Amino acid sequence: MPRSKKGKRASNKGSLRQEVLQLQLSAKTAVSYKGGRNGVKGESGASDDDLASDVLSHYSSTSETASVLEEGTGGEPVDEQTAQEETEDKLKQCIDNLTDKSAKTRLAGLESLRQAFSSRVLYDFLLERRLTVSDCLERSLRKGGAEEQAAAATVFALLCIQLGGGAEGEEGFRMLRPILSSLMIDGCASFTARQSCARALGVCCYVSAAEEGEDLVKSLSHLESVFMATYPNREGTLPTPKPGAPGLHSAALQSWALLVTLCPASRVNVLQDLHLPKLQACLESSDVNYRIAVGETIALLVELGRDIDRDYEYEDSESLCECLKGLATDGNKHRAKNDRRKQRSIFREVLHYIESEDFTEEKVRFGIEGIYIDSWMRRRIYDAFKEVLESGVTHHLQFNPLLRDIFGLGAPLILDAAVKASKISRFEKHLFNSAAFKARTKIRNKVRDKRADVM
């Protein structure tokens, strides 16, 4: 199992959820349980405490192998071990393809790995092959074409998510961070590859950066150098972006915002003073997606300021709110209808938060569980992983210990039919999520204090 980063995220083991499940199970006196990597069977007369402990601590290998590629099986059912072996053989072939002379073959291998890494948890398989995969990705980033570079950056982000926040992830990130950064700031590289590198740099640094903060400082600086190109010049005029540049600027800004959530309070205050006035000017950008990224980043910076000091208020908040009101009611016909609708929705939320600290809560469901997105910081973290994992984010929320640790979900669950029938109430899950997130925030604040000496 991947090791979580000490201090960066709380290692909440789900004590509240354990109590909830024990209550749900208390009416059941005899439940048969089967699970775990080694197929350990539970006794039918096991106590409720033992069953609840098993439910909370065992990992579901069945769920991981349920989506095994079906080629070669002929549609016939296969046992778990056979399916696992077939999957690993195909993954080994994909890794071998990364060294092929044909760019088309290498791209196909990268795409297959992207799909596999996003839809399964493969920690055990990748642990002994991480250096081989990292070497192949480094070669693609250095020598591949634009499409290959973009694919390699995405696969590396997925590799970091697979390896978790332990020493293995740190090792890979230290190896490829300089390459991701140099490619991202290379004005001669394609915008597609640079955008992919910007997203990968944010996620990989968030997951794998060491606690001393050196990698975090360098990553923040490189990301700033990209999106600050959109800031107004001395005359107060916004530069005209090149075709394809807004996507890169949005990715760099969003990754930067993700990493700001790891910074100590003293650094957050400096970043607010430096960037908020310039970001406010960027709300007039011609690109709707970049305007939205800017608005969400402003809301996040204000939220972080209020977390540090309850009386925090942006000094030019009146002018900011006027600008946000205009964007929240924008009816300019020269903008696409869908763009106007999307923009109005987001900026209404930003405006309500700036004025009254109201946040529109969302719930993300997966299996019988769910997480509540109840802050701008939590939304930025969730969106960052969703952008990389895409549809596989729900699977990783269920079974990846790293994501479950980040969102305070505790150890992966494995439930039999009897337990699945006894769902935890929405209110109980909301209480657990809120308590876990608050506990993780307290521990993260302690780590911020450690980084303050470096930053």
Image (tube, rainbow, N blue to C red):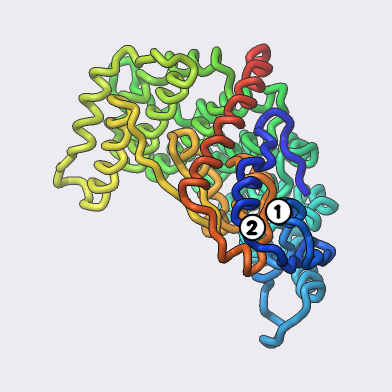
Mark 1 crowd level (few <14, some 14–19, many ≥20, 10 Å Cα): many
Q: How crowded is mark 2: few (under 14 residues within 10 Å), some or many (20 or more)?
A: many
Which quarter of the picture shows residue 437? top right
**Up-down relation of residue 360 to residue 338 (above or below):** above
Residue 188 drawn at (x, y percent): 53, 39
Residue 157 locus on image (x, y percent): 64, 46
Q: Quadrant of the C terminus?
A: top right
Would you name the residue on which mark 2 appears? 25
Q: Is mark 1 on a helix, strand or loop?
A: helix
**Residue visible at 66% across and 66% down in the picture:** 416
Q: Name the residue under label 1.
A: 52
Work out whether residue 416 or residue 274 is closer to the camera in this orientation and state it.
416
Residue 345, given in percent of the width and then of the height, sits at 27, 43
Q: Residue at x 81, y 65 (%)?
A: 43
At label 2, the amino acid type is Leu
* Quadrant of res 80: bottom right
Image quarter for residue 77? bottom right
Residue contact at pointers 2 and 1, CB within 8 angstroms: yes
Q: Which residue is drawn at 72% across and 66% down?
A: 30
Residue 159 appearing in the image = yes
Please report whichever mark, 2 or 1, sits nearer to the chain's N-terminal start. Answer: 2
**Residue closest to the eye, 70 or 399:** 399
> Above or below — where is 276 with respect to 407?
above
User: Can residue 189 be seen by looking at this rendering?
Assistant: no
Type of residue at label 1? Ala
Q: Mark 2 to mark 1: distance in Å?
A: 8 Å
Q: Position of residue 94 (x, y in %)?
A: 73, 65
Is 274 located above or below residue 329 in the figure?
A: above
Badge 2 marks a residue whose secondary structure is helix
Please give the name of the residue rendered at 43% of the width and 43% of the height, measured from the top-left corner: 247
